[in-house]
Each structure stands twice: as C-alpha cells, then as structure tokens.
Image (spheres, helix red, strand yellow):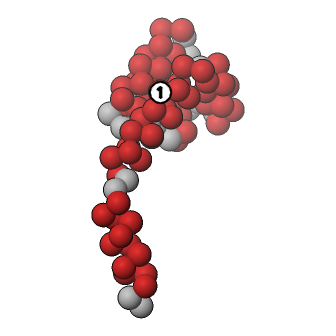
Amino acid sequence: LYPTQERELYKFIVKLTKRGLPPTRQIVQNMASKLATERVSDSWVTRFLDRHRDQLLYKWANAIDAQRLHADSSEKYIQYFKLVHSK
C-alpha cells in the first residue's frame, strides 16, 4: 500500500476500535486488500501491525477494557453461581 492508503487503513482500525469493535486480522487484511485493489498477504498484515504496534495496541486494548468494564457486574456473577450450584 502507498503511505496514504496505510493512513486510511490506520484510521479505519482506530474508528472501529473507538466504537468498541476492534477489527480482527482478517478484517484488517480485507480492508487493506480493498485499498490495494489486490489481495495482501498474511505477512503484510503482520508487518503493518508491527509497524503501528504502539499506536494500535493501546487503542485496541482500551476498547476491549471498556467493553469488559461494561459487561462486568456483580449481579451477573451472582446469577451465574446460583445457576451452577442449582444443578
């Protein structure tokens, strides 16, 4: 990809991650392939993610942590263990 296309891919990843939906490697590969108008390899995706590791990993981890925070509640744990112990 050209640098401008890589920036578009980076923005796409950041946008999805901010929405709480960090993309999988397959989604990154599909989007990169669409931008390049030809299929990019798995190793290209690995190199891209490695080049942007510091910026993307932080955003990726924060989105996942936010999802976990919202999903976590004591009521859910109590309900789960009641179900487990009732059987």
Looking at the rendered structure, the secondary structure element under dot 1 is helix
The residue at 56%/28% (across/down) is: 57
Report if residue 37 is visible in the image: no
Q: Horizontal placement of 73 versus 59: left or right? A: left
Residue 21 sits above or below residue 87 on the image: above
Mark count: 1
Residue 72 sits above or below residue 78 on the image: above
For residue 48, which quarter of the picture?
A: top right
Residue topped by disc 1? 59
Residue 12 in the image: x percent, y percent? 40, 24
The residue at 48%/8% (across/down) is: 4
Residue 60 sits above or below residue 75 on the image: above
- Extreme bottom residue here? 87
Q: Horizontal placement of 84 versus 2: left or right? A: left
Residue 56 in the image: x percent, y percent? 53, 25
Residue 34 in the image: x percent, y percent? 45, 28
Report if residue 46 is visible in the image: yes
Q: Nearer the viewer, residue 32 or 10?
A: 10
Residue 84 in the image: x percent, y percent? 43, 81
Few, some or many C-alpha atoms within 10 Å of disc 1 (few <14, some 14-19, many ≥20)?
some
Q: Horizontal placement of 45 versus 7: left or right? A: right
The type of residue carrying mark 1 is Lys
For residue 63, which quarter of the picture?
A: top left
Q: Quadrant of the N terminus?
A: top right
The residue at 41%/75% (across/down) is: 81
Q: Nearer the viewer, residue 70 or 21?
A: 70
The residue at 42%/91% (across/down) is: 87
